[in-house]
Image (tube, coloured by chain):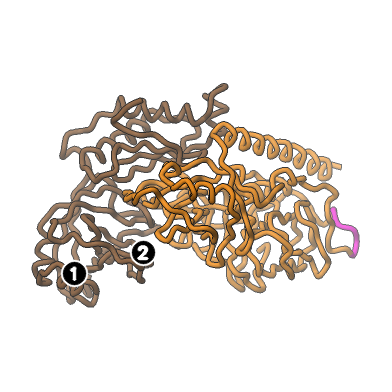
Amino acid sequence: MSLSIIKAGLLDTIQDTGRNGYGNWGINPGGAMDNFATQVANMLVGNCCSEPVIEMHFPAPQILFEQNVLFAVTGGNFNPTLDDESIPLWHPIVARKNTVLHFPKLNYGATCYLSIHGGFCVEKWLNSYSTHLKAGAGGCEGRPLKKGDEISTKESSIYFARLLEQKKNVRVLPWQADVRKIYKQPHEIMVIAGHEWQSLQKESQTDFLNAEYSIHPSSDRMGYQLKGPSLQLEHKIELLSSAVHFGTIQLIHDGQMIILMADHQTTGGYPRIGHVISAHIPKLAQLRPGDRLRFKIVDMDTAEQLLLEQEQELKILQRACLSRLNDLVLC
Amino acid sequence: MNDDYKIFPIGDSAITLELANRIDLQLNRKAIAMKEWLAGNSFDGLQDIIVAYSTISILYDPLTVKDKYAGGEKAFDFVKRKLTDAYANAQVSEPGVMGKTIEIPVCYDPAFGFDLEYVAREKKLSIKEIIDLHVSKFYYVYMIGFLPGFSYLAELDEKLVIPRKLKPVPVAAGSVGIAGSQTGMYSLDCPGGWQIIGRTPLKLFDSSLSPPALLSAGDWVRFHEISSEEFAAW
């Protein structure tokens, strides 16, 4: 075994970049809320980007490493410690066996990711390791991690103990992924207009673009409910159910909005005000209940361009991570 | 421009072609035929194709599409063209060629169908009349959606048309519901707003099977009544 859960967190699940291709069985892609942090977590430890990671919310679990590991923590900052010693996010870190990873205090962010070099040996269902809670499949028996769970990692050829100084239990490797560009202006969320945007009353369009909305406490992996000025349509619209997507902003019956998140249902029949652009999903995924946000409408060109820039950042990071790790292991 | 359909983005990595905003067997068959055409004329970056009542949606990876095909244009424009090609080329097959017919046993005991009495009162029907009307028709499976394995069937006899509840209540897996002109089956335990009139002992969704959902869009369903004893022994 490679790690065990000493104490479970609020909602700890195995996730990867998602399960595509099964919408016609009503199965959504699921996957990590913050796909960017997930991919960077894997890169930092030399994994392929699609390896499963542990997604954690606050309060997060306590985890015992049962063997020497190379790991990384990315995403939300819950002030991680290893054997009570503070450790940084977005760094590769070597830990000696029998050390305990703990997240004592919420600093910022909503979802935090743990990756381990080699990747976790967990259950694959329909081509993905992501935990599908409703179907009860994928990840760890299709359920959140609980106390006593043991998860093994794939064999690694790297002898990690060599990287640790004698009598030291931890070594933070001296490079960090610079992700400021991706998470800058965390409260400004860009969207493209939805099909029913034009059906909103003019005042409601103005409210949507100018007012501040906050994330309702009942938000979860399925969707973020928003609190703020209620929006009205010019006239009532009855829509048949059709496909919806991660980031779709639906107008529900009381004039409030829900943003569909990773575990959204596959189809829905509410008016679509807008769709959060893919490049801003990581920022959105890091907003917590009570956090505020503002919307800005952009065109498809901008949305695609920003995603392309994000992908270029990822590629640069991946190359840099691999070359640094190779230098370290080979020397 | 084309008056036969609308195309619009549902994000920067998904696009919908809407044939109409109504339940129509021929339009659903057209959407299924388009899905089949796209499966045979696939492209790198295509992640999923979702058929709903009279719509078809493509989920795609804009980065792959842009890299492989789009050159200077938007990934959206490339995928949009794929959809219009699918519309132009997909042929609807003859009735009877598509889908399988599945018999679904349903126990209409009010212990399972906890809204039967409400429906009877509202529609001024006896419970027996409701059951007779419900089992009298073949239903077409328009789509699987909302939940893993949840089936949307239509169309109900108009004597049974009733609005959904304003507030969802807990509903058990296997529950058979009606709402508007639709009937459907809850594949998993979940909150639901349809009027529940019975329950099937069949497992509608099983993650260990392939395919995991008992029904697919394009299938036909016929319900038949079973007793509580038969349900228990199923």
The chain that hosts pointer 2 is: B
Colour chain B is painted in: brown
Whether residue A89 is visible, yes or no, is: yes
Residue A296 % position (x, y): 59, 44
**Residue A87 vs residue B167: left or right?**
right
Residue A142 is situated, as x and y percent measured from the top left of the image, at 49, 62
Is the residue under label 1 in contact with that under label 2 (CB below 8 Å)?
no
The picture places residue A265, in percent across and down from the top left corner, at 42, 55
* The quarter of the displayed image where residue B42 is located: top left
Front residue of A273 and A40: A273
Q: Which residue is mark 1?
A: B119
Name the residue type under label 1: Val
Which residue is labeled 2 in the image? Answer: B188
Residue depicted at x 77% and y 67%:
A99
Dominant secondary structure (helix, strand or loop) of the stretch shown in magenta: loop
Residue in front for this viewpoint, A144 or A291 = A291
* Outermost residue, front side: A203
Disc 1 crowd, CA 10 A, few/some/many (<14, 14-19, 20+):
many
Identify the residue at image location x=21%, y=42%. Answer: B25
Where does residue A51 sit, x and y in percent of width and height? 61, 49
Q: Residue at x 20, y 76 (%)?
A: B110
Q: Which chain is orange?
A: A
Q: Which mark is residue A89?
A: none
Q: Nearer the viewer, residue A47 or B144?
A: B144
| Magenta segment | A163-167
Q: Is residue A47 left or right of residue A198?
A: right
Residue at 80% from the left image edge and 62% from the top image edge: A96
- Residue A239 appears left or right of A134: left
